[in-house]
Image (cartoon, rainbow, N blue to C red):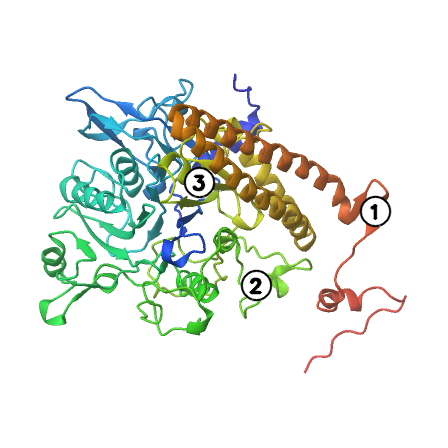
Amino acid sequence: MKKPRLNRWQLATSLLTTLLFTGQTLACTTFIITPGATASGAMYVGHSDDGHLNDPRLIYVPAADHPPGSMRPVHFDATSIGELPEYGSFVYRRYTGSARGPGYKNPNEPQSKPIGFIPQVAHTYGYFDGNYGIMNEHQLMFGECTNGTKMGNVKPSPKHLFYSAELARVALERCTTAREAVVLIGHLIDTYGFHGTGETLPVADPKEGWLIEMIPGDETFGGLWVAQRIPDGEMVVSANELRIREIDPDNPDQLFSPRLHQVARAKGWWKPEDGKLDWLRTVSLGEYNHPYYSLRRVWRVMDRLAPSLKLSPWVEDGYTRAYPLTIKPDQPVSRRQVLNLLRDHYEGTEFDMTKGVAAGPFGLPYRYLGPYESAGDVADPKEHHDGAWQRPLSVYYCTYSFICEGRSWLPDPIGGLLWFGLSKPAETAYTPIYVGSTRLAAPYTSADPRYYSRDSAFWAFNFVENWATINYSGVHRDIVELRDPLEQGHFAAIAQADKEALALYQKNPAAATSYLTEFSVHTAEQVFTSWQAFGDRLIVKYADGGMNSPGELNHKVGYPKEWLESTDWKNGPTSYARPAAPQTE
């Protein structure tokens, strides 16, 4: 489609937006719930991509064969340390070119330029891609979150070739199991180096889950990494702080960089007489951004799944051991519970963000950040701050979130499900997409956060979430009334589609692929059109502060009495007499 000509105001706005995006950082939440902890026996990996109007496109990267001697380009990702125009990668458009299949081709945009190259393999697998690699055709799945470390904002170079996003993509292209992926990622860091910030990648297949954490290097070393297997029957959550602690060379469930102890000792971060190397304390400053920015989310997820542990939301510092790496949920976790985990604003706790003066009259849980907030994603947590908001799981600057579901009892094309939701988790509807799909619904692959488009699923969801700020308690109730039956309908449709696809697969795998693709595309298109129509209805229903319907316009809602009493309403003009001046001492 030909891009419309922009007027002077639009050009200025576009330029300002680009400048504001430059240097933007992400601050995500991610988790693994293993099969032994779930009601169905499925593996789940969840991720919220909290990047605030970054690239929201979901892209299918097809499987491919490569001739001998081919080289794979390694590209820069602006999600690491911000935009570097020399690589042609931008926050609003992460990659443009032909190396990842037709989904990223766009001759009208600047073409991405690689940092360097690594040897290519003969065959690469198909996968779903976002700002980070997501899930491949063999049910290998990833999440991600950024962490503050002593090494931060390292620029790409021949000695620091990779960032976590490209590491996940290479693993999705080449691996079928989580353990293979961890070993490959570790090898790539050791061989080619790592740039950007500290990173966590949860990686899982339908049977086994791992957490791999990494930090960038400097002129003396390329990067460091550690990995730990997540025991079956347990779960782990990461929220912008490294989670792995003691590194034990004799632990068969841990893997780590061969140079870890050598580098840590040379840097003065650790001494052998200290005992086992504490990864978090050795390479990081503790908690990310400000106190409880990370740990409160960790507490909240653990407390929701295992309230019997009676974990306290209050700890002594960012290096606390109050929250173990993994926990066993009190009850088997259902798919519905998993989809709801990232939709939380601490409702029902002392930190409930729908309560208090900052939530306004209609319980808005979102707190917009500004110039008075703490200084970004890798700030020293000991830095003084005049104030801070709670950091919820569902945050206003979320671009998209997803839940990967792996099911070992089904063939890979059928067993792997991606539940994908655009904009805030609390205001999205998760759409199921089979990993056997070889095509995605167009509204989910087309979006530019710089320009509103009626054809984009991102903008359909983004509009609804922003309209909800007019009367959050009312609009959110409307969202739930539409969203929950919609998702419940997906559950039933998936159960039937599994049966039909399996019958086809046993006779003709290609026919199953076609069926799964059409099912996924049709379902996503239905979600998009229903959400767009829903947004259109909301425009009228909440127009001008009223509650409107065809049968009754301007049904006055007003404000809750409790909130009114907290304002100067009670001192308003109820008589002609001049109010008495407040007494001073």
- Assess disc 1: are there few (<14), some (14-19) or many (≥20) residues with their C-alpha within 10 Å of its C-alpha: some
Q: Position of residue 367 (x, y in %)?
A: 55, 56
- Assess disc 2: are there few (<14), some (14-19) or many (≥20) residues with their C-alpha within 10 Å of its C-alpha: few
Question: What's the residue type where badge 2 is placed?
Answer: Glu
| Nearest the eye: 397 or 569 | 397
Residue at image coords 66%, 38%: 535
Q: As drawn, is 387 to the left or to the right of 267? A: right
| Nearest the eye: 276 or 273 | 276
Q: Mark 3: which secondary structure? A: strand
Q: Position of residue 13 (x, y in %)?
A: 53, 33
User: Which image quarter holds the C terminus?
Assistant: bottom right
Task: Find residue 347 and name its label.
Answer: 2
Residue labelled with disc 1: 554
Q: 11 above or below 239? A: above
Q: As drawn, is 322 to the left or to the right of 39? A: left
Q: As drawn, is 179 to the left or to the right of 266? A: right
Lower sequence index among marks 3 and 2: 2
Residue at image coords 29%, 24%: 64
